[in-house]
Structures are given as C-alpha cells and as structure tokens.
Amino acid sequence: MTMGQSAVGVILLYLAVGPLPARSCSLRAGVGTGGVAQRKDAAPSQPPAVDNNTYLIGPRDVLNISVWKEPDLSRSVPVRPDGEISLPLLNDVHVAGLTPMQLAAAITQRLRTYVSDPHVSVIVEQVNSQVVYVVGEVNKAGPVPLLPNMTVLQVISGAGGLSQWANQKRIYVLRVENGQSRRIPYNYKQALRGATNNEIILKPGDTVVVP
C-alpha cells in the first residue's frame, strides 16, 4: 500500500466513525457529565417532617418565618434558650410551647399594626429541642433523639447500656418543670423484669443520670 492509499484510508475511516469523544478535556476540568448527573439526582435538603398542628416548638429549634411579599420580614431564626425569637418590628416573640400554626397566627396578629393584611407561614427547619440526655455510667453518654413515648430503659439502651460500674439502684431522671428541678427515682431492675408501673415516659430536656 502506498502512502497516498494510506492517507485515503484514514480519511474514509474518520468520515465513517466521526471524531473520538474528548474524554481528556472533561477529566482535566473535573466536571464530566457523570458528575453533573450526580448533582442533579442528589436529593435536596428537606426540612424535618413535623405536624404543624401538634408539634410544640422548643429551645434550639430553627424556624423559617415567611411573610408573603415582605422579604425584609422573612428569615430563619433559632429559638433562644429563653424560648423566644427576635423579629423585625416585633422584637422578642415567645414561641416555646406553641405549634407552628399557633405561632403563625400570633405573628400575623401582631404584624397587622405594621403590615396590611399580612400572610405568615412558619416552618420548622431544624428540630433540636426534642432530645434527652444520658450522663454517668453508660457506654455512650450524651444527647439522644427523643421519640414518642420513649422510656428510660429505651434511652439507656440507645446509650449503649450501663457500664460495669453503674449503680443500678440509684438511677434517676432529672426534670425541670416551672423553673424547678426534681429527681424522679428509677428502678432499672424492675424495668428489666417488665414492670410497667415503674417506667417513666421522658419529656424533652430530661436527663437520665446513672451514678
């Protein structure tokens, strides 16, 4: 085969299959089509699923307050330890113990002094108040997410169980009510035997103390 015949063969092959894909360009850029597809398919961050009619807002929750057509009044705000948030025009607003629906109604009422026919929505972006704490002789001390009707036995289990030095007879729940703290004794051995009259249903902010 002559050099001219070889050149003609290459041209015919190029016309048949077309140019090769420029893989090296996308690899150098670090943004290949596979990477773009992965970002598109990734699930967007969603707020936690709470019932706006029953969920009670607590300290350290993060709320999204949206006032229709009033971007300067709309914002995400954390609930302070005193159970209040700060909003433009309204200053401090007590929110702890209210449902999102109740809070939206309360903010709407107060904004009527400044805004004509306000429309307010409240979304719980982060649920941080629904936790209990385990301290002392457990295998994993710290905060535990609070589930509905959660018991002390379940929380201890979630903390990895008692350590070998735990005093099972002196476990108690430390609870703050109306600004006053009180100890609620807990009989761990009876709970293991299935005694339901000794079990304690935990509330947000409770601390299970294992000496």
Image (tube, grey):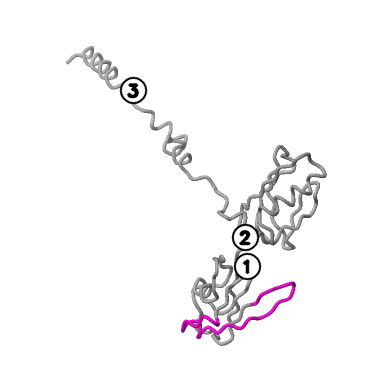
Q: Secondary structure at mark 1?
A: loop
Residue at mark 3 to residue at mark 2: CA–CA distance: 56 Å
Percent position of residue 30, x then y: 46, 37
- Callout 1 amino acid: Pro
Q: Residue at x 44, y 39 (%)?
A: 35
Q: What residue did someone put label 3 on?
A: 19
Say whether residue 43 is magenta. no
**Upstream in sequence: badge 3 or badge 2:** 3
Badge 2 density bin: few <14, some 14–19, many ≥20, Cα 10 Å: some
Frontmost residue, 180 versus 163: 180
The region drawn magenta spans 174-198
Q: Secondary structure at mark 2?
A: loop
Picture quadrant of residue 205? bottom right
Q: Is residue 49 left or right of residue 75?
A: left
Percent position of residue 31, x then y: 46, 36
Percent position of residue 166, x then y: 54, 83
Q: Nearer the viewer, mark 3 or mark 2?
A: 2
**Upstream in sequence: badge 3 or badge 1:** 3
Residue at mark 3 to residue at mark 1: CA–CA distance: 65 Å
Frontmost residue, 197 versus 58: 197
Instruction: Determine whether label 3 and label 1 are within 8 Å by CB.
Output: no
Q: Is residue 10 left or right of residue 76?
A: left
Q: What residue did someone put label 2 on?
A: 128
- Callout 2 amino acid: Asn
Q: Nearer the viewer, mark 1 or mark 2?
A: 1
Q: What residue did someone put label 1 on?
A: 204
Say whether residue 186 is magenta. yes
In this view, 60 is above or below 172: above
